[in-house]
Image (cartoon, grey):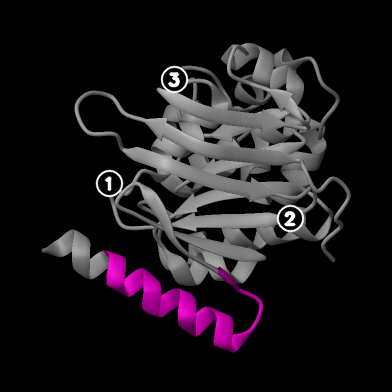
């Protein structure tokens, strides 16, 4: 059940972000209520990762505002944002591949917040229990994704930013990973998800935002069949534009 507490939990207003030349995100605005799950879907290169990295403080903004619990994040470092309660599960996982599963989970404590325990993570992802002494670099793609999510949860986030969790995963593994995200959502975890797989995203999200040409082109509720059809139709339009 979705728990709505803070209407001004995350506010992104007129955000402009670009690496060079034309901006990747152009006057983009997004909001997320506490306890809500929002998926930003779009084709490859739409700017999903750029948005999440900007929120995490990894990529700077040219202009616009980002507020978390009404606090302006513009001058907050990545480390400070983690302490504030924002945790990014990045595309590509970015694990310490020469450390064991157990040691990677320990690094989640650096956030200095009280989050899930390692035992909680092993209960969520039983496969990691079997691999706890294996090096992260020896894990399969699915196991690495599980570990990346688990490490973030140990940091005690108020808002979990998850970037392309299904990328490179087999359908059954994707189903397992999204099953855990659904459990987290049901427990009241706030999640902002960047994802190409619209069908997987709609299974967990309360709302889906279709991103294209640097802006949110469509926003729809994803808990009804009618809403899912509209989201799918609008997403297909963005894919058609990107393929031209």
Disc 2 versus disc 3: distance between alpha carbons? 25 Å
Rate crowding at label 2 as few (under 14), some (14 to 19) or many (20 or more) other CA atoms within 10 Å. Answer: many
Q: Which residue lies furthest to the bottom in this view?
A: 226
Q: Please state the horizontal and vertical placement of residue 201, each as a whole percent of the image.
A: 53, 64
Residue that appears at 47% across and 30% down: 53
Relative to 32, is 243 on the left or the right?
left
Q: Please state the horizontal and vertical placement of residue 196, each as a whole percent of the image.
A: 39, 58
Disc 1 versus disc 2: distance between alpha carbons? 25 Å
Q: Which dot marks residue 7?
A: none
Magenta span: helix, strand or loop, mainly?
A: helix
Please tell me whether residue 231 belongs to the stretch shown in magenta: yes
Rate crowding at label 1 as few (under 14), some (14 to 19) or many (20 or more) other CA atoms within 10 Å. Answer: some
Q: Residue furthest left?
A: 244
Q: Which dot marks residue 36?
A: 2
Residue at disc 2, secondary structure: loop
Rate crowding at label 3 as few (under 14), some (14 to 19) or many (20 or more) other CA atoms within 10 Å. Answer: some
Q: Which dot marks residue 45?
A: 1
Dot 1 or dot 2: first in sequence order is 2
Please tell me whether residue 180 belongs to the stretch shown in magenta: no
Callout in the foreground (3, 1)? 3
Q: Please state the horizontal and vertical placement of residue 75, each as a whole percent of the image.
A: 60, 11
Specify whether residue 178 is in view.
yes
Identify the residue under disc 3. Answer: 60
- Vertical placement of residue 219 versus 40, above or below: below
Residue at disc 3, secondary structure: loop
Dot 2 or dot 3: first in sequence order is 2
Q: Please state the horizontal and vertical placement of residue 181, each as a whole percent of the image.
A: 66, 55
Disc 3 versus disc 1: distance between alpha carbons? 18 Å
């Amino acid at each position: 059940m979705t728990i709505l507490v803070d209407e001004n939990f995350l506010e992104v207003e007129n955000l402009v972000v670009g690496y060079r030349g034309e901006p990747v995100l152009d006057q983009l605005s997004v909001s997320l209520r506490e306890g809500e799950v929002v998926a930003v879907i779009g084709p490859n290169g739409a700017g999903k990762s750029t948005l999440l990295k900007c929120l995490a403080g990894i990529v700077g903004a040219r202009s616009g505002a980002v507020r978390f619990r009404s606090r302006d994040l513009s001058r907050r470092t990545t480390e400070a944002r983690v302490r504030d309660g924002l945790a990014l599960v990045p595309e590509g996982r970015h694990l310490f591949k020469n450390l064991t599963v157990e040691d990677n989970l320990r690094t989640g404590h650096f956030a200095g917040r009280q989050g899930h325990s390692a035992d909680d993570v092993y209960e969520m992802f039983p496969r990691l229990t079997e691999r706890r002494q294996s090096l992260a670099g020896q894990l399969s793609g699915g196991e690495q994704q599980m570990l990346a999510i688990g490490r973030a949860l140990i940091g005690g986030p108020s808002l979990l930013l998850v970037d392309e969790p299904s990328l490179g995963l087999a359908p059954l593994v994707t189903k397992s990973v999204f099953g855990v995200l659904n459990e987290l959502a049901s427990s009241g975890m706030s999640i902002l998800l960047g994802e190409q797989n619209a069908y997987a995203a709609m299974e967990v999200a309360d709302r889906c935002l279709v991103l294209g040409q640097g802006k949110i082109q469509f926003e729809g509720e994803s808990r009804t069949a009618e809403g899912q059809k509209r989201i799918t139709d609008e997403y297909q339009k963005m894919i058609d534009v990107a393929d031209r």
